[in-house]
Image (tube, grey):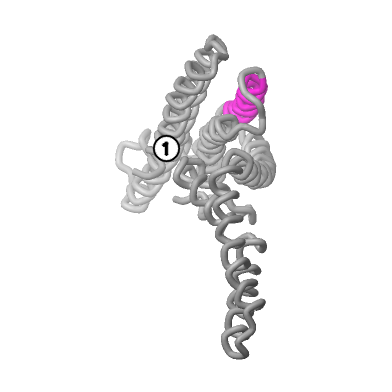
Amino acid sequence: MSRAQETSTSTASPKPDEYLPVAIQKAVVQHGMKHPVTIYPIALGVSAGVVGLLFNIPMLLGAAVGLGLLGPLWALLQIFFRHEALGSQYLTTLHQKQKQYEASLVSQIETGLKDCAQTKELKAKAKTGIAQLKSVRVKLDNVQELLGMKLRPNEITYGRFLGAAEQVSLSVLDNLNIVVGLLKSATSIEPGYINSRLKEINLKKKPSQEEEDQRRSLQDRLDLWNKQLLKVDQLMARNEEAMTEMERISAAVAQWQTGRKFAINDFESAIKQLHALALQAHEYDEA
């Protein structure tokens, strides 16, 4: 089940590969190539060149050459001399998209879990889900605060690390969204009634054929209940593992020195770990 399939939110979330260096470089290049100062001078230069050739006007031919050079030079300036600033802007845009998606998803999960908590047999698991929802948000806030102590917010490394941490958080939220669906599907099964009816049938020495049929149907529903709750437990366990690893990475980052060469190398390693962690948190879902 994909993120688009498992939630009704309208805002799409950024994908993990959108935070990779190659994606950032691609965004910077596209910005440089599609910037109006790149496109318009070239278009004007071509027009001036055509008119200059048709009417033999040297001034227009010279203008065509100048305008033809201005566009590519501007693009090169953007790509090679403003890479850090443009890359940071790109990551800020992703961060804003992530926040919009999360806000809607968190509200959806919280409402769903509270509804499921009204069912006696599901209350404990719904409460665990609500606790995980609160916990992952606190951990992400702590990561952002920690990053602010180590890096400047306008640095690409800051944006990439925060983006990777947000992907881990989003994996936890996505799993909780699946948990809500599983719990809601289990609310109508009524295990209390099923166990009571099975007990009545099993106490009979010679159940009728109709009662045997009932027993099979009831057992099938009870098996489905247990299967749904097992999936819930597996998803929640995956979430706990992800949050624990997130804490370990944060604790390691907190101890790093702020010297440029040393810190950046370690940050790159931590970013890779977070990306792997985000994907690992979804391994159960992809299976």
128 up-or-down from 65: above or below: above
The quadrant in which residue 160 appears is top right
Residue shown at 57% from the left, 48% from the top: 13
- Queried whether the magenta region covers residue 199, the answer comes back as no
Q: Position of residue 48 (x, y in %)?
A: 63, 79
Principal secondary structure, stretch drawn in magenta = helix
Query: Mark 1 packing: few (<14 Cα in 10 Å), some, or many (20+)?
Result: some
Q: 53 or 136: which is nearer to us?
A: 53
Q: Is residue 112 visible from the viewing direction of this image?
A: no
Q: Where is residue 38 in the image (x, y as percent from the top left)?
A: 61, 62
Q: Is residue 125 visible from the viewing direction of this image?
A: yes
* Residue identifier under label 1: 279
98 up-or-down from 240: above or below: below
The range drawn in magenta is 128-148
Q: In this view, does 75 lie to the left or right of 210?
A: right
234 up-or-down from 57: above or below: above
Q: 68 or 245: which is nearer to us?
A: 68
Residue shown at 38% from the left, 44% from the top: 286
Q: Position of residue 236 (x, y in %)?
A: 49, 30
Q: Where is residue 258 in the image (x, y as percent from the top left)?
A: 57, 14
How many numbered marks, from 0 up? 1
- Queried whether the magenta region covers residue 146, the answer comes back as yes
Secondary structure, mark 1, is helix
